[in-house]
Image (tube, helix red, strand yellow):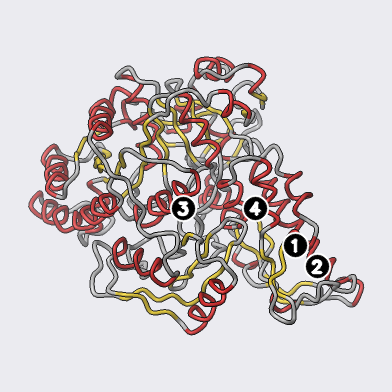
Amino acid sequence: MKSSLEIAQDHALRPIVEIARAAGLEDDEIELYGRYKAKIELSAIERLSDRPDAKIVNVTAITPTPAGEGKTTTSVSLTQGLGQIGHQPILCLREPSLGPIFGVKGGAAGGGFSQVVPMEDLNLHFTGDLHAITSANNLLSAFIDAHLFHGNELGIDPSSVAWRRCLDMNDRNLRFVVSGLGGKTNGVPRETGFDITAASEVTAILALASDLADLRRRLGAITIGETFDGRPVTAEQIRCAGAMTTLLKEAIKPNLIQTLEGQPCLMHGAPFANIAHGNNSIVADRLGLKLGDYLVTESGFASDMGMEKFMDIVCRTGGLRPHAVVVVATVRALHMHGGGGAERPGSAAESYKLIEVGCENLAKHVENVREFGIEPVVAVNRRPEDSDKEVALVKRLAGEAGALAAVHDGFGKGGPGAVELAEAVVEACDRPSSFRFLYADDAPFKQKIEAIATRIYGADGVDFSPVAVAKLKAFEAQGLGSFSVCMAKTHLSLSHDPVAKGRPRGFRLPVRDVRAYTGAGFIVPLCGDILQMPGLGKTPAGFNIDIDADGKISGMF
């Protein structure tokens, strides 16, 4: 079988104008970025407002392992499978960040015969949205430093400035820096640092904004620091919000691409799920609701990360009501959750035992879906080395955990390999559901955090540091008590400990600090040793990426 990149490069794409027209968009509602990608005017959402809403299917997964689960591949497979059985699905995905592409993960377009294309474009600079976000974020940093340099009229305490610059790249050397050195003409020295762009508040805001005016309001509400007497200072007071919005006027428009089988994909928004809210933009969701009968939207990492944030942040902000959730699992990943290593076990009996133990992790993620009153569907993403008995065992254990279960081989067969999964999702969507949030808007912050920790992570309780307690009280006193909670913790475990696989029990969640993202409208508790700027490993994926004299890329996936 060809590599995923070779499959994508050999595929004959349809002009994006045809994809747009088939979806119900008018020619003056799309702005072409070449022949195979386009941006969509937000006015299309209003024009299509009388159309019935599609059913929303969220795609999540078991806890990530080095073996991989294939969540994006499954999202594309499901979309193509729904097309195979006569539906008009719309796929919504986040835009890839360059950090993971050149770091550990590599490409983020799906795999095999279940991909979105053009693969190279969307994995690299795409339509420039992340660059625009980086520029807007760093413009605010420049305005802050200029304000401090030119007399500090607002009386900002330089040591309180929490706003950091960002870069769409893994660069550990920029986590903590001192800026403004070199004498008076070079600014006011202060300690600061960089976050990766996908973890910045501007990225979160762009994904949560409902339109350009809402984007402008949210950017103005960003808190950058405090005055010497403890009063919050916003981007509006720095007089930067208008300029930031101007830089983002094109970035707020959803991007249109296609699956290998010609279904439309709205790829827009880029927040990470372990240190941000991990879902595509609300404007893409709202547009997708009107363009098809099923909206397939993928959340980052597992149900304790992106899915919980989709339910409690995105659905709350955007007024969305999901109908079903797909939990992706593989035999190989369940082996690892059962205590196995990178190599498959030698005997069938050993394999079955590892699967049974590993499925405790799967069962917890099914329970997490049920916490929101939604029907779960377990998608067994089949690999060539999986035996029929292993796959059947996972299906049986998924059923015992309370989920519908289906096997798919979208990687090897595309849409025809995902028909069983598509039929299971349609059945789940037709079942009665009672969607509910995990916590109420007016619940105290500590109660919201404890609800996520105990009911979703399985913790026995939460240990708040004195710093976290003081900040939570201060945020509530500032009138932020209705904000949602966006937990920042490792994605490698249901707990805060990245080495705790399976279904950890008997632990308490440590919250060491809390940040307020006043533009995005949520607080961010920092759990364990979570960082907002990743670093490159010893052998990053970028080692394998190259381009020949004819411009053909290799090694991306």
Q: Nearer the viewer, mark 2 or mark 3?
A: 3
Q: Nearer the viewer, mark 1 or mark 3?
A: 3
Q: SS for tag 2? A: helix
Query: Residue shown at 40%/25% (left/top)?
Result: 89
Sequence-earlier tag: 3 or 4: 4
Q: Which residue is mark 2?
A: 145
The percent coordinates of residue 307 (x first, y second) are 38, 50
* Neighbourhood count class around disc 2 (C-alpha, 10 Å): few under 14, some 14–19, many 20 upward: many
The percent coordinates of residue 551 (x first, y second) are 64, 30
Q: Which residue is mark 3?
A: 313
Q: Which residue is mark 4?
A: 218
The percent coordinates of residue 15 (x first, y second) are 57, 17
* Neighbourhood count class around disc 4 (C-alpha, 10 Å): few under 14, some 14–19, many 20 upward: many
Query: Residue shown at 31%/25% (left/top)?
Result: 413
The percent coordinates of residue 292 (x first, y second) are 43, 24
* Neighbourhood count class around disc 3 (C-alpha, 10 Å): few under 14, some 14–19, many 20 upward: many
Whole-number angstrom distance, CA of label 1 to CA of label 3: 27 Å
345 vs 17, nearest the viewer: 17
Whole-number angstrom distance, CA of label 4 to CA of label 2: 21 Å
Tell me whether the residue at label 2 lies in contact with that at label 1, contact meaning CB atoms closer than 8 angstroms: yes
